[in-house]
Image (cartoon, coloured by chain):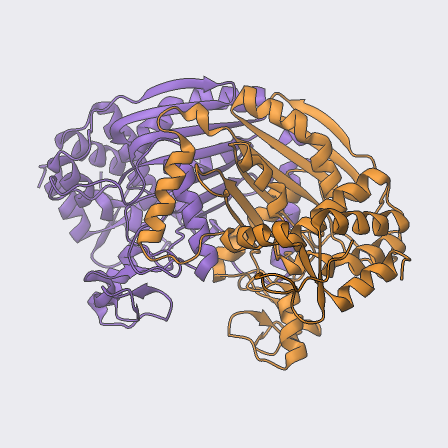
Chain colours: A purple, B orange
């Protein structure tokens, strides 16, 4: 299953690491999820999600997340066996009650109906409530772009971001993800937190004793600070881009929670579930069929925009690095450090 | 018509200014538009838009814009008599060919059909192409929120923003506007450029000899600069919030132009029309009926979020200042400087 690669012209896996086929990684992750209380269906869906993030080099949402998933399942905070309830709310509107389960199975359960609606109506909306999103957001939109649709999604999380001009955390990191098809190459995809920085990056800065740039966080008194420890010890993050990022973060709360019936980032309480790490909120997804607008082919227009962005000197397109890493992982296996592999085997009871 | 106000307890209009009822201002503006070649319908729609911006204290999109409208009409770049062609593209998808006219008459022509679709389908999309948008963006979404809907719109403009990591201008200021209903008070509305600063604010800084903060613009060689003159003389703006704002600006190009069939911000050429100032692009509008999601009333949830934002110390809600100014203008008339009033009368041929 694991392929310690050092042959041929290709560079070896980094020292102290191995390469594993994506399928094998997915199977190992699914065993971990099942062992810690999810249904087979949920295990397969989450394992694919985590394995694909690792495959794409999106390390912060890859196997790095597994201990958090496991401790959350152990805490009883999330229902790993929840069966989402899909409602055909209107001709272009699907709503899903995730029933305190993960968001990804809710997407899976609604996808066929949502696609049918997009094809027939031109645009369709998916409103998920009572869901836990602990993953990267791009996997929720990228598959639609691969089928020629444009997709846009919003998810709120847990109170750790101070609204612009405020003193206390209220918004989550509240990411927005977008995907659009091109004629050549992988879709244009971005996934951006509306906070100035990801929470994990603050932790890394604190560990390394680095100061942060200005405008990234506040301390416990709501005063600006560049000290990552002060942000972590009762302080909070700021939105990216000042009042504009704050307005977008507010919009994410309204769309992902207000509109779906999910919790706002500040209105759930997991005190009774030590070890819980996944926010219990909601998510909104909009999918558009660009062929309905008439005129030129959308994917061709997107390609023309990409050409112009490169001509203007933009070095890297959104999603490009991830797709380059994906190609390498599919050809040569996913690089996993020995420590991570030991951790996964421990979680799987296979150590 | 003009009411030089200095009586009673209310503060007088600022020195060198008068107060005019909104209706009278609208009528004066409509006369200007008609005199410079628009149809009666287009004149009424644009006059309402500009008068409402002035009423709300949104000065940069109020009567300040009138010389630009007039010189653009005189240049033959825009068709002030265009009749938009509305197409019922799919059950939840309306497309409009603005036929080289202004975007606002296109909205007006499509509104009834769009609302019918939102009510029956749960979500609906309006794709406008070949349109000129020279106005604030919030007036395109606020009326939907006043009727209980959530609305989101995107418009691209003219190449003046360098993509993140690039050297040359490509994107427009590419604003995003959002509106959502509340149970009390005016809707939550924001309208934000995805550029670091509005173009007009750069001009003001240059005039006043002020340096800009870092990360606002580049010079003609694509190098970072804080000198507003360097930005104006062959340089360009940067997106707000670094690579995130740049990704959002790209998304606006794809939605407002790629998807509608309108021009990208960089692919129209007005060289043959000296005096032209309005970008000939496209616009996308999404309207959602939040009652379809089931669960709690959306406007009540929005109100709860507002309460939480105030509790967290946020001083000012998006749109709040504008609505306060509106109340004052409706009670006491719109404040207009004597110089502006003279300019308007000149444009109307009534000097």
Where in the figure is residue A224, as x and y percent of width and height? 32, 69
User: Where is B252 relative to A105, above or below?
Assistant: below
Question: Would residue A153 be found to the left or right of residue B49 on screen?
Answer: left
Q: Quadrant of residue B230?
A: bottom right
- Is A54 or B197 nearer to us in this picture? B197
Where in the figure is residue A324, as x and y percent of width and height? 44, 50
Question: Would residue B342 be found to the left or right of residue B176 on screen?
Answer: right
Q: How many marks?
A: 0
Where in the figure is residue A217, as x and y percent of width and height? 32, 64
Q: Quadrant of residue A134?
A: top left
State whether residue B235 appears in this view.
no
Name of the residue lying farthest toward the bottom: B209
Q: Residue at x 43, y 36 (%)?
A: B183
On-image quarter of the C terminus of chain B: bottom right
Q: Residue at x 37, y 36 (%)?
A: B301
Where in the figure is residue A179, as x and y percent of width and height? 50, 41
User: Where is B233 relative to B21, above or below?
Assistant: below
Question: Would residue B246 be found to the left or right of residue B299 on screen?
Answer: right
User: Where is B46 relative to B342, above or below?
Assistant: above
Name of the residue lying farthest toward the front: B8
Q: Quadrant of residue B62?
A: bottom right
User: Where is A181 relative to A238, above or below?
Assistant: above
State whether residue B351 appears in this view.
yes
Q: Residue at x 25, y 63 (%)?
A: A231
């Amino acid at each position: 299953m694991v392929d310690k690669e050092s042959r041929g012209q290709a560079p070896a896996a980094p020292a102290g690491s191995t390469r594993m086929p994506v399928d094998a990684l997915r199977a190992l992750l699914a065993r971990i999820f099942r062992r810690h209380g999810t249904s087979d269906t949920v295990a397969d869906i989450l394992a694919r999600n985590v394995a694909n993030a690792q495959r794409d080099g999106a390390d912060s949402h890859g196997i790095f997340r597994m201990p958090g998933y496991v401790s959350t399942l152990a805490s009883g905070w999330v229902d790993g066996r929840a069966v989402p309830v899909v409602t055909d709310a209107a001709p272009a509107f699907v709503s899903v009650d995730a029933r305190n389960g993960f968001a990804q199975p809710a997407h899976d359960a609604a996808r066929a109906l949502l696609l049918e609606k997009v094809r027939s109506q031109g645009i369709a909306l998916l409103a998920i409530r009572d869901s836990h999103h602990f993953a990267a957001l791009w996997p929720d939109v990228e598959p639609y772009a691969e089928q020629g649709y444009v997709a846009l999604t919003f998810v709120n999380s847990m109170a750790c971001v101070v609204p612009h001009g405020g003193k206390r955390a209220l918004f989550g990191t509240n990411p927005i993800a977008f995907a659009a098809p091109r004629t050549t190459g992988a879709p244009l995809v971005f996934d951006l937190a509306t906070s100035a920085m990801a929470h994990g990056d603050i932790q890394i800065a604190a560990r390394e004793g680095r100061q942060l740039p200005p405008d990234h966080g506040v301390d416990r008194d709501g005063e600006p600070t560049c000290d990552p420890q002060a942000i972590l010890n009762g302080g909070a993050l700021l939105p990216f881009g000042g009042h504009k990022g704050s307005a977008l973060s507010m919009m994410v709360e309204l769309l992902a929670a207000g509109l779906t019936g999910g919790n706002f980032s500040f209105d759930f309480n997991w005190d009774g579930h030590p070890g819980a790490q996944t926010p219990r909120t909601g998510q909104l997804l909009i999918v558009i069929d660009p062929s309905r607008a008439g005129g030129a082919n959308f994917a061709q227009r997107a390609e023309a925009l990409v050409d112009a962005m490169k001509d203007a000197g933009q070095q890297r397109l959104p999603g490009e690095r991830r797709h380059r890493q994906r190609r390498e992982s599919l050809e040569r296996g996913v690089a996993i450090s020995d420590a991570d592999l030991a951790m996964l085997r421990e979680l799987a009871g296979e150590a």
